[in-house]
Image: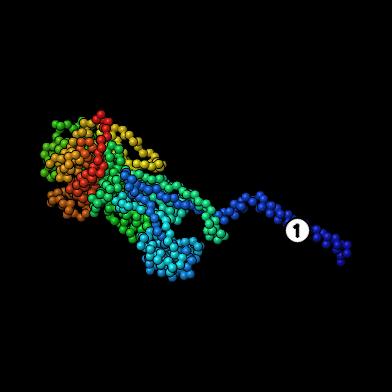
Amino acid sequence: MYREGDRYRVFSRRAAILAGGKMALVSALIGRLYYLQVLESDRYVTLAEENRINLRLIQPSRGPIVDRNGTPIARNRKNYRVVMVPEQTLDIEETLDRLGAILPIGAAERRRILHEMKRKRGFVPVMVQENLDWEEVSRVEVNTPDLPGVLIDVGQSRHYPLGAAAAHVIGYVAAVTEKELTEDPLLQLPDFRIGKSGIEKIYDLALRGKAGSSQMEVNAVGRVVRELSREEGKPGHQVALTLDSDLQQFASKRFERKSGGCVAMDVHTGEVLLMISTPAFDPNAFVTGLSEESWKNLLSDRRAPLTNKCIAGQYAPGSTYKMMVAAAGLEAGLVSQQKKVFCKGYVELGGDRFHCWKREGHGLVGLHEAIQQSCDVYFYELSRRCGIERMAEMSRRFGLGQSLIPDLAGEQTGLVPDPDWKMATFGAPWQGGETLVTGIGQGYALATPLQLAVMTSRLVNGGYEVFPHLTQELVQPESVADRPPATFKPLGIRQSTLSRIRQAMIAVTSEPKGTAFGARIHDKAMAMGGKTGTSQVMRISDRERKEGVLKNRDRPWQERDHALFVGFAPLSAPKYAISVIVEHGGSGSAAAAPIARDLLLEIQRRQPSKAARKNPVAS
């Protein structure tokens, strides 16, 4: 047993230890309070403010796209939407049933609405349906007393007044996918749309604008109490195009029920006045939401409505390529007024027979008559003398086999074949017969409608390297910063060469033997010149030639020849060039030339030539 003194000493030690422990705890607590309230005060004030104040982005207005005359071809319009606040209705299912009697709400849409309501807080509005017309808005408003929690909200959506007429050029906007998410906070907004194709895609950053911000005071559960401050954003830039919306609509109607592409441009400036690819699609459908069935129909359509055939359609240029062979021959001194070729309907090379389109032949023809009447035999002979290297070099000078326009994505380069290309592609040497076939625009040669329009422009503008473009005004985005300069360098082609080819192209439409004489423009002040072309889709066998070749109208659509035409107007001072391709249209003179005639007439009526631009060469 402890004695009384020992017990007191033990108690005193325990009391001291306990007191020391309490002092240590109090000191730690005081230190922690000092750390939190003094040293970390700024941080926790900030956190408290962040809990109380919610910073929200304000979506900027997307910039409009207008045509050369200021007419909107992509703009924003009010988007009336029905939203529902879950906490304001006692029975969500019943309210949806009542709303479904006023507006059609499909089963999938209903599941989506209920899923969002489960994910979000009860006071957060959930979008039920958007893009309502005024009649639908009125029906909802009238029935509001029976629809607790249902409200009409007004936002903005993209609208394309021309619809399918400019779809491939303008493109469309749609919701952001996970792959497209970047550090831009705008992309996180649930109803934000970005450009997916065409001008909308290439100039998306310029069109987006700059977001604004709003400081909202919220309570502990995130409900908005009031707005503390607001800073409006900056709307996107306006993009002014070189297109004429009236011409687009006119061309769209002229191409109705046809498949193909057409490009018309100013031969001096490179301004693209119209660009039509058919069939097309309605870009508004992508904004409002395309159904799965509609998307599958677009993808499975053999006429490829989603492809811009003006820049991505690659076709054998057919007889429109003969001007390149003519230019190569003239520049090499292989063509003269005295040098003529007798066309008996075919030529033979290495045991193979190469036929002219005219079975009985054209007789004795020179360059002028060969272009006017599109004699294949003449160009077989001229291409043999020129050689594939000269033809390929001349083709590239005139814009074939290369990308030309920076304003659109997805442009294909076509193909200018030569021996090096064939060896690299097939590992085989070039054959003489391939030169002959290339000489009439068949074989491996490929071109887009845009390239053919540029080729024609360079032929008739005095021999200058004009480049096509679609925009007039815009802060240049990085993607098009390498646009060629406004002044174009000469191609180095003699004026006598260009003059002879141009005169022959005039004969195509103005002389009775010309292949497009039936599609001529009778008004001499607006008359056009040009060249027809027919691009074979199916090879004609020897058996067919003996038994008789089926006419295009008797073949299945997909086996018919493509019809082509390139032209320019007016004759006295060419200002506009055009290329037309009608897929499986048969003859260029019958299917493509009449369309080119009508469009060149309309262009000249709507875009009257003022004083023709001074030709640097002529001066």
Q: Is residue 533 visible?
A: no
Measuring 38% from the left and 52% from the top, which residue is drawn there? 76
Q: List the residue tagged with mark 1.
A: 22
Q: Is residue 481 visible?
A: yes
Q: Quadrant of the N terminus?
A: bottom right
Residue 573 or residue 361, whichever sits in front: 573
Residue 541 or residue 18, whichever sits in front: 18
Measuring 47% from the left and 52% from the top, which residue is drawn there? 58
Give amino acid for label 1: Lys
116 versus 576 height, above or below: below
Is residue 504 rendered to the left or right of residue 65? left
Is residue 313 rendered to the left or right of residue 95? left
Q: Position of residue 604 (x, y in %)?
A: 23, 42
Q: Position of residue 574 (x, y in %)?
A: 23, 37
380 versus 27 height, above or below: above
Measuring 36% from the left and 53% from the top, which residue is drawn there? 159
Q: Quadrant of residue 26?
A: bottom right
Is residue 599 rendered to the left or right of residue 17? left
